[in-house]
């Protein structure tokens, strides 16, 4: 994670839930949870959990959700909203997930890989901690053949990389820019 990204998320943590709505809608949460096929008996890892956008939805379904984020401030916001529920909060890096091998049933994430210094390492580490043969993740900023290749190299089969109707919306040089989003999923070999 770059220092710029760390600084940005520390600064916006208190207003992220409002800001996030300008980037993407709640349909993203539903698409990710549907793709991950989260079950009531599952332990789910939310990588780049931030203020708990995906964590909150997964916690309504799963037995336990581990919310992993590098930002103390973002995690603090999530703790305020979701503390006392079936959520465990961890500070850490998605490229070095602080969990044992094969310890979670599903890994979910939203717009995390584009912040990673080494997204291929992040995907391999997600595969490492995954127990059940499912993986679902959503992010922007990668071409789909590259994502498919990274998933194959990390040990996934039955790979699907599909474009979504939803777009991440941001401002660049005083213009509104829409960045296509997609959903990638696969089964661990």
Image (spheres, rainbow, N blue to C red):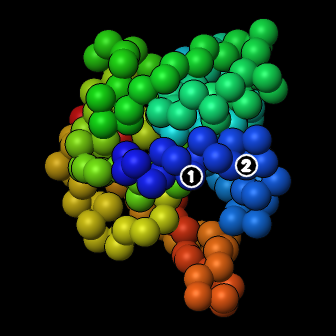
Q: How many marks?
A: 2
Q: Quadrant of residue 88?
A: top right
In the picture of the structure, the residue carrying the numbered disc 2 is: 16
Residue 35 position within the rendered picture, expressed as x and y whole percent measured from the top left: 57, 47
Residue 156 position within the rendered picture, expressed as x and y whole percent measured from the top left: 27, 44
Q: Nearer the viewer, mark 1 or mark 2?
A: 1
Left/right placement of residue 159 relative to residue 172 reads left
Q: Which mark is residue 8?
A: 1
Q: Residues within 10 Å of mark 2 (few under 14, many from 20)?
A: some
Left/right placement of residue 121 relative to residue 93 reads left
Nearest the viewer among 165 and 3 is: 3
Left/right placement of residue 84 relative to residue 63 reads right
The mark that comes first in sequence, 1 or 2, is 1
Q: Work out whether residue 99 can be spotted.
A: yes
Q: Work out whether residue 44 can be spotted.
A: no
Left/right placement of residue 32 relative to residue 149 reads right
Q: Which mark is residue 47?
A: none
In the figure, 110 relative to 25: above or below?
A: above
Nearest the viewer among 139 and 145 is: 139
Asked which secondary structure carries label 1, the reply is helix
Residue appearing at x 41%, y 58% in the figure? 114
Residue appearing at x 32%, y 61% in the figure? 147
Asked which secondary structure carries label 2, the reply is helix
Residue appearing at x 48%, y 45% in the figure? 6
Q: Residues within 10 Å of mark 1 (few under 14, many from 20)?
A: few
The residue furthest top is 84
């Amino acid at each position: 994670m770059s220092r710029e990204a760390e600084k940005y998320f520390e600064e916006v943590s208190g207003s992220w839930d409002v800001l996030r709505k300008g980037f993407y809608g709640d349909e993203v949460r539903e698409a990710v949870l549907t793709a991950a096929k989260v079950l009531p008996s599952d332990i789910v890892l939310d990588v780049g959990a931030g203020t708990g956008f995906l964590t909150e939805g997964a916690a309504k379904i799963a037995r336990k959700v581990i919310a992993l984020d590098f930002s103390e401030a973002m995690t603090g916001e999530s703790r305020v909203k979701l503390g006392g529920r079936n959520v465990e909060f961890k500070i850490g890096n998605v490229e070095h997930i602080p969990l044992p091998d094969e310890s979670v049933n599903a890994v979910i994430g939203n717009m995390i890989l584009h912040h990673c210094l080494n997204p291929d390492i992040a995907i391999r580490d997600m595969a490492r901690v995954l127990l059940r043969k499912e993986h679902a993740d959503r992010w922007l900023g990668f071409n789909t053949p590259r994502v498919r290749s990274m998933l194959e190299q990390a040990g996934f089969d039955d790979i699907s990389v599909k474009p979504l109707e939803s777009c991440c919306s941001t401002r660049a040089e005083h213009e509104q820019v829409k960045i296509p989003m997609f959903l990638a999923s696969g089964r661990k070999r």
